[in-house]
């Protein structure tokens, strides 16, 4: 079972969406991830939102002109995404079993983005498999971006993956580290408890 399911029971979709809607109404910037991605690849690029949740990042990227596909295991989150953007391609799938061809999707994404603590919330022991499957969905030269917490202050669950472990999984999947930041605003990484990592296939 994924740590996410243990945490939420996979019934959190509406609450999660409401939290970000309230942040947006208060004037907070809720599109940092999409802006970060848009600085990496040009409009029109194919983007896979891995662990897309309620679709906040993917819907914004679509508005900016990107060709996006969203995948998530949590039906409650996907229900919100489909309600907000019924014309976009949303797929319910376990990332550890993700195979684009089985869903009728070409495995030639320019960018894979895994925002929202995807890796620390996976089922224990599946991290390397998920990295491998996401890397395989990229075209040669494509980028994978993942942002996640590394300590208790930045996670809703106990820390379960280190940056060195993540880099090792990426290397084994044929990915090379390009850059690393402390936030989705591209602040330099200083060894803190949250990191946004960019790898290239």
Image (tube, grey):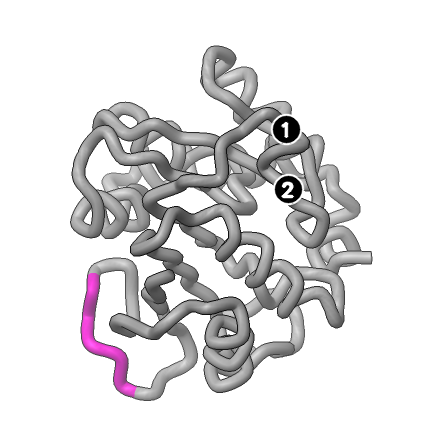
Q: Is the magenta stretch mostly helix, strand or loop?
A: loop
**C-alpha distance separating marks 1 and 2:** 7 Å
Picture layout, residue 190 above or below residue 37 = below
Which portion, as a residue range, is magenta? 186-190
- In the picture, the quarter occupied by the N terminus is bottom right
Whether residue 153 is visible, yes or no, is no
Q: Which mark is residue 48?
A: none
Picture layout, residue 168 above or below residue 181 = below
| Residues packed near mark 2 inside 10 Å, few (<14), some (14 to 19) or many (20 plus) | some
Element marked by disc 2: loop
Picture layout, residue 171 above or below residue 131 = below
Whether residue 175 is visible, yes or no, is yes
* Percent of width and height locating residue 45: 27, 35
Image check: 4 left or right of 179? Answer: right
> Is residue 189 located in the magenta-colored stretch of the structure?
yes
The reply to whether discs 1 and 2 touch (Cβ–Cβ < 8 Å) is: yes
Q: Circle 1 is placed at which residue position? A: 103
Q: Could you tell me which residue is drawn at 49 percent across and 39 percent down?
A: 107
Which picture quadrant has residue 160? bottom right
Element marked by disc 1: helix
* Percent of width and height locating residue 85: 46, 17
Q: Could you tell me which residue is drawn at 47 percent across and 12 percent down?
A: 87
Which picture quadrant has residue 2? bottom right
Find the residue positioned furthest to the top: 87
Q: Could you tell me which residue is drawn at 65 percent across and 44 percent down?
A: 98
Q: Circle 2 is placed at which residue position? A: 99
Find the residue positioned furthest to the right: 1
> Is residue 103 located in the magenta-colored stretch of the structure?
no
Find the residue positioned furthest to the front: 140
């Amino acid at each position: 079972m994924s740590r996410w399911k243990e945490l939420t029971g996979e019934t959190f979709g509406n609450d999660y969406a409401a939290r970000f809607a309230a942040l947006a109404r208060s004037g907070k910037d809720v599109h940092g991830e999409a802006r970060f991605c848009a600085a990496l690849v040009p409009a029109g690029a194919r983007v896979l939102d891995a662990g897309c949740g309620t679709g906040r990042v993917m819907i914004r990227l679509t508005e900016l002109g990107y060709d996006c596909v969203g995948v998530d295991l949590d039906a409650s989150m996907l229900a919100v995404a489909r309600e907000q953007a019924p014309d976009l391609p949303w797929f319910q799938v376990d990332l550890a079993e993700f195979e684009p061809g089985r869903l009728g999707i070409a495995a030639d994404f320019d960018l894979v983005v895994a925002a929202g603590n995807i890796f620390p919330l996976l089922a224990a022991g599946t991290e390397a498999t998920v990295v491998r499957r996401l890397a395989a969905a990229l075209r040669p030269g494509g980028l994978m971006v993942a942002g996640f917490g590394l300590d208790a202050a930045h996670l809703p669950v106990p820390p379960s993956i280190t940056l060195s472990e993540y880099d090792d999984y990426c290397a084994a999947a044929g990915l090379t580290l390009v850059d690393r930041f402390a936030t989705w605003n591209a602040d330099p990484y200083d060894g803190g408890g949250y990191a946004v990592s960019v790898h290239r296939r």
